[in-house]
Amino acid sequence: MTTPEPRHITPPDRLRRPVASALDLVGWTPLVRLNRVAEGIRTPVYGKCEFMNPGGSVKDRIGQAIIEAAEAEGSLGPGGTVVEATSGNTGLALAMAAASRGYRCIFTMPDKMSTEKVRLLRAFGAEVIITPTDVPNDDPRHYTQWAARIARETPGAVLADQFYNPANPKAHYESTGPELWEQSRGRITHFFAGAGTGGTITGTGRFLKERNPEVQIVGVDPVGSVIASFFHTGQMPEGEVYQVEGLGNDKIPGTLDLEVVDDYVSVDDRSAFAMARRLTREEGLFVGGSAGLIVHAALERAREIDDPDGFVVAVLCDWGEHYLTKLYNDEWMTEHGHPVESVGVRGP
Ligand SMILES: Cc1ncc(COP(=O)(O)O)c(C=O)c1O
């Protein structure tokens, strides 16, 4: 009698035994080969499945790291409070880590944000303060100013400060980078990521460059963000509105080190959304628009390189569910002028 092939590959060690807490579920996300969207492209392209973190995004890595760094330096302890101005994945990651460690969490969020996002944070026990959207950056009612004030005035509170906190890139230097090095067995040739705070590209890029200076670190920006333009010209253009969420910026954050980046490319909303939809429908990878943006750029470069020995990695930043009312809603797509049929990079 022949032994049947095991249906699943051997689980990594940490799945063979219980882990200590929800925080130990963060990281060691799988690396998956992209197949149908990469048809006709000889360079192998892989997606780093950050949406498989317990909070559904790459930000889980920094939620944990920021809290642990504050504990280590003594600014956060029993009965402490974590404060941040956030509207998205970082809030969720911090709320999850704070819940697991028993801290109080307070977030400020501009009033343009969806009620789903507020409910999600409150589900983890976080307090959410809704602030006016249409106020200047230096107005005390602006959500960043408001959060800073709460952190100053609340005893035992720390501001997570993801755009300036060195624990953010450090988390990626210590986890995302080493994971990719091991998962590719040192064969990675290109790493594609976007920068919101820049933590992912800075920390991961720095680690990979130290291992092999030949690895190409490529930033991907939405058209309208200023980072790609600043990278190429050293000038700060006026930022413009774009719809892809989570990456790009209208300033250069303190946590972004462009020294580790070899190239920066821009991709428009339309291509990003089309590729995200293709990743879901053709690969079974249910991701947000930013993953579509990054994969679009990675596939274009992979086609140009045309090297079967290449090893291109694109970050699949977050889970698609937050976007069911946006890029996964045909009416929303049509209203915003995006075609609902799949378009994007295809084989020849
Ligand atoms: C949804 C989402 N979250 C997080 C990130 C990464 O952001 P950061 O540069 O802050 O590490 C990105 C960018 O790739 C993103 O698209």
Image (cartoon, rainbow, N blue to C red):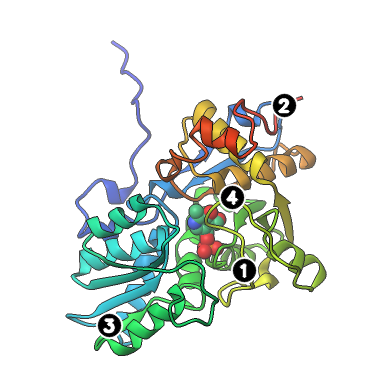
Disc 2 target residue: 347
Return the x and y of residue 221 as percentages of the image width and height: 66, 56
Return the x and y of residue 162 as percentages of the image width and height: 46, 72
Mark 2 or mark 4: whose residue is earlier in sequence: 4
Mark 2 or mark 3: whose residue is earlier in sequence: 3
In the displayed orientation, state which residue is furthest to the right. 233
Disc 3 target residue: 76
Task: For marks 1 and 2, give the one nearer the viewer.
Answer: 2
Note whether ligand 1 is within 8 Å of mark 3. Answer: no
For the N terminus, which image quadrant?
top left
The local secondary structure at tag 4 comes to: loop
User: What's the residue at 18%, 81% (across, down)?
Assistant: 78
The local secondary structure at tag 1 comes to: helix
Vertical side of 52 occupied by 282: above or below: above
Return the x and y of residue 17 as percentages of the image width and height: 21, 49
User: Marks 4 and 3: in contact by CB < 8 Å?
Assistant: no
The local secondary structure at tag 2 comes to: loop
Return the x and y of residue 324 as percentages of the image width and height: 43, 38
Marks 4 and 1, how far apart in space? 34 Å
Q: Amino acid at mark 4?
A: Gln
The local secondary structure at tag 3 comes to: loop
Q: Which mark is residue 210?
A: 1
Task: For marks 2 and 4, give the one nearer the viewer.
Answer: 4
User: Marks 1 and 3: in contact by CB < 8 Å?
Assistant: no
User: Marks 1 and 4: in contact by CB < 8 Å?
Assistant: no
Disc 4 target residue: 243
As rendered, which of 72 and 7 lies closer to the eye? 72
Q: Is residue 312 visible to the viewer in this orientation of the structure?
A: no
Q: Label 4 crowding class (10 Å Cα cut-off): few <14, some 14-19, many 20+? A: some
Marks 2 and 3, how far apart in space? 52 Å
